[in-house]
Amino acid sequence: MVNLEIARRRLHNQHITRREIETPQALVEWLGAVQAQDFAGAKWALGLRLHGVTDNDVEQACSDGTILRTHVMRPTWHFVSAADIRWLLDLTAPRVRQAMAYYNRALELDEALFARTNALLAKALQGGKQLTRDELATALQQAGIATESGQRLGNIVMRAELDGVICSGARRGKQFTYALLAERAPQARVLAREEALAELTVRYFSSHGPATAQDFAWWSGLTLADAKAGLALAASRLAQEAIDDQTYWFSASTPTGPQFTRTAYLLPDYDEYIVGYTDRSAIFDASHTSKLDPRGGLLAKTMALDGQVVGHWKRTFKKNSVVIAANPFVALSSDATRLFADSASRYARFLQMPGVSPFEDASFT
């Protein structure tokens, strides 16, 4: 399995080259979770993989609560399905709490205080209320909890998310709000730990495979021992292949040789195609490392040609239009330029805006 075939299979399994899933919630469930600290980029990550879905459609799914944005794997935000949030938190939150322990001590946040702040936030939100971060800070301050430090407030709110007390509400204008998880996702499933570990293992390798146990440990935030235990539990539902002393796992139903068709995509920052793996050698030529955006590297908005990262892109808005500018690392053929222009037009349709001169020739000099 050479790198190109690994890349093709990942594009297929992540539903980038095939768009057969119909709703944002179903896609998030397929992927397990979708990194989402950049909200606009995370919405495009879903739109890229769905047919005919707009930015407004994904926003509506977040407003309705079928998709929730919360801290669940690693100390960052993810989109998760409302149906999955409980068992995912039960499985992955202990590792995130452990990772945050040092910072919490530095901010004089201990278990007794978290028990108090969790209760205060629950009281402030009960009855279907959805409050902004500033409004939550006010509720805490009125009870004598210091929140002048933005980091202290952030850790208090994150802990309430990790403890399954609060989650995302609908946006109020451009402001994010929080709601009670019990009210937002009353039907969320609860699984025993081994069942949850097996479920997440199957979802990851079905949607992100071919991938290694190390990739899964990185993506999930679980230990490598847990990743290997998950593979043992799910082995009958997965296939494996050894390449260069590495074992790659994937769904047993994955096509062994997806038909090659030239593809070009504009991936958002923190896209699962990039961030879902600790080893990115299958999708990126290290000789281009010096050309990466120093502000974000591979995690910035990337151009993917035939599954390989070949550049960065950015967007700006002008007179209700979106302007796409490209910064490729390599010379692009006219065919590749046309494919990227098509991808830029698709992004403009997702935003329901006209695209202004996407990928002018000057962008490729």
Image (cartoon, rainbow, N blue to C red):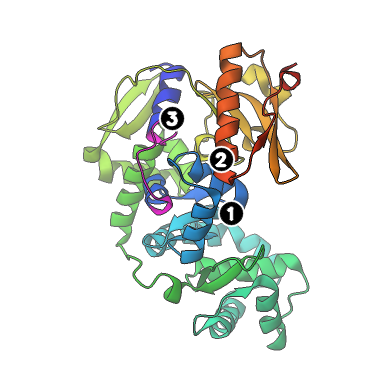
Q: Is residue 361 above or below residue 323?
A: above
Q: Mark 2 sits on what residue? A: 349
- The label number, if any, that marks residue 76 in the structure image: 1
| Of 229 and 22, the residue lying toward us | 22
Q: Position of residue 143 (x, y in %)?
A: 68, 88
Please report the residue visible at 56 percent of the width from the left and 48 percent of the height from the top: 42
> Mark 1 Cα within 10 Å, few/some/many (few <14, many 20+)?
few
Q: Is residue 178 magenta?
A: no
Looking at numbered disc 2 in the image, what kind of residue is underneath it? Arg
**SS for callout 1:** loop
Q: Amino acid at mark 1?
A: Thr
The residue positioned 69% from the left and 27% from the top of the image is 326
Residues in magenta, as a range: 13-25
Q: Position of residue 63 (x, y in %)?
A: 51, 64
Magenta stretch mostly in which secondary structure?
A: loop
Say which quadrant the C terminus sits in. top right
In the picture, measured across the screen, residue 200 lies left or right of residue 277, that is left
Gap between marks 3 and 2 measured at Cα: 21 Å
Residue at 29% across, 62% down: 192
The image quadrant where one finds the N terminus is top left
Callouts 3 and 1 close, C-beta under 8 Å = no
